[in-house]
Image: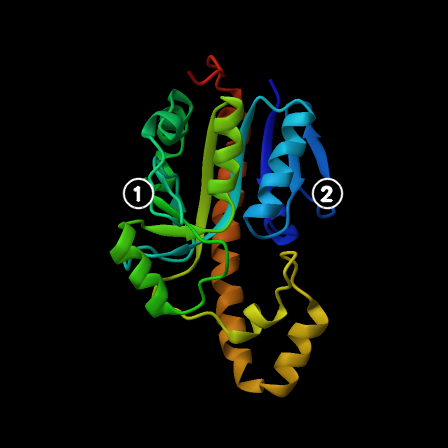
Amino acid sequence: MITGIIVALPEEISSLTSKKICKGDCFFINENILVACSGAGPENATKASQLLINKGAKRLISWGCAAALKVNLHPGDLVLPQTLITEEQRQFSNLHINTPWLENVLDHLSPLNPYTGPLAESSFIVAESADKKLIHKQTRAIALDMESIAVAKIAIEYKIPVLVIRCIADPVSMSLPKAVSYALNKQGDIILAKLLWFLLTHPSELPGLIKLGLHFNAAKNKLKLVANQLDIIVGFEQNTAIK
């Protein structure tokens, strides 16, 4: 059975494989695992999910980093949500998320102390700490990302299982450096030239970027530990059809 993994950024893909995958492309990292580099945002994640299904994927994984919405989550913490919440704050039914597959993965990854609380959706970068706290208050979600709900929507449309594997990069107390939002274009790509220009003209942003880089590395290192169990994760067999 082919498992398709959607990853937004090349830096996150490096937690799975050393192979370089261009945005919009996919690659078999072994005979059963097909990885796609989607780019950031729900529209890109939707396209990548459809691509993987067209290539034969019978279940999907949303893989990468997330922002913490709850104060007790720290950089590197693993989140395996049982519930996903859209921007309209409509919860997906647990029937679609809390599958035997997820239960099996939670059991095998229990030494990594995964969190299972709700994960919320955002179609744009939520940069400010105050905004992250507000989303938590509104939804009770513990974490947030831009792609997982889009991946889940495609999986539900095709009645196949979906799993979300995310690690915390930025804690709720951290406001992202403005350079990040400035350098991200509408296609979900970080434009390095814009990032460097912003740093040149706003040198006070550098410490925040360094701190974010350290947090990102903590998330990526935890994802690498999860990737060490990938054969077990994708080796779980079940009836793939969701009724």
Question: Which of pointers 1 and 2 indicates the residue nearer the eye?
Answer: 1
Quick one: label 2, few (<14), some, or many (20+) residues within 10 Å? few
Residue 101: image x %, image y %? 42, 23
* Badge 1 element: loop
Residue drawn 63% across the image and 33% down it: 50
Residue beneath the point at 67% across and 33% down: 51
Question: In the image, is 81 to the left or to the right of 239?
Answer: left
Residue 172 figure quarter: bottom left
What number is the disc on residue 217? none
Q: Earlier in the sequence, mark 1 or mark 2?
A: 2
119 vs 231: above or below:
below
* Residue 74, x across and y down, in percent: 36, 57
Residue at the spot of label 1: 117
Q: Position of residue 42 (x, y in %)?
A: 54, 47
Mark 2 lies on a secondary structure that is: loop
Q: Are marks 1 and 2 in contact (CB under 8 Å)?
A: no
Residue 15 appears in view = no
Mark 1 nearby-residue class (10 Å; few <14, some 14–19, many ≥20) = some
- Name the residue tied to disc 2: 19
Q: Is residue 7 left or right of residue 152?
A: right
Q: Quadrant of the N terminus?
A: top right
Q: Residue at x 65, y 84 (%)?
A: 200
Image coordinates for residue 35, horizontal then vertical, percent: 65, 36
The amino acid type found where label 1 is placed reads: Gly
Q: Is residue 101 visible?
A: yes
Which color scheme did the rendering employ for the protein? rainbow
- Quarter holding the C terminus? top left
User: Measured along the vertical axis of the image, is residue 39 above or below residue 226?
Assistant: below
Q: CA distance from mark 1 to mark 2?
A: 32 Å
Name the amino acid, label 2.
Answer: Lys
Report the side of 204 relative to 17 (left or right).
left
Q: Nearer the viewer, residue 146 or 111?
A: 146
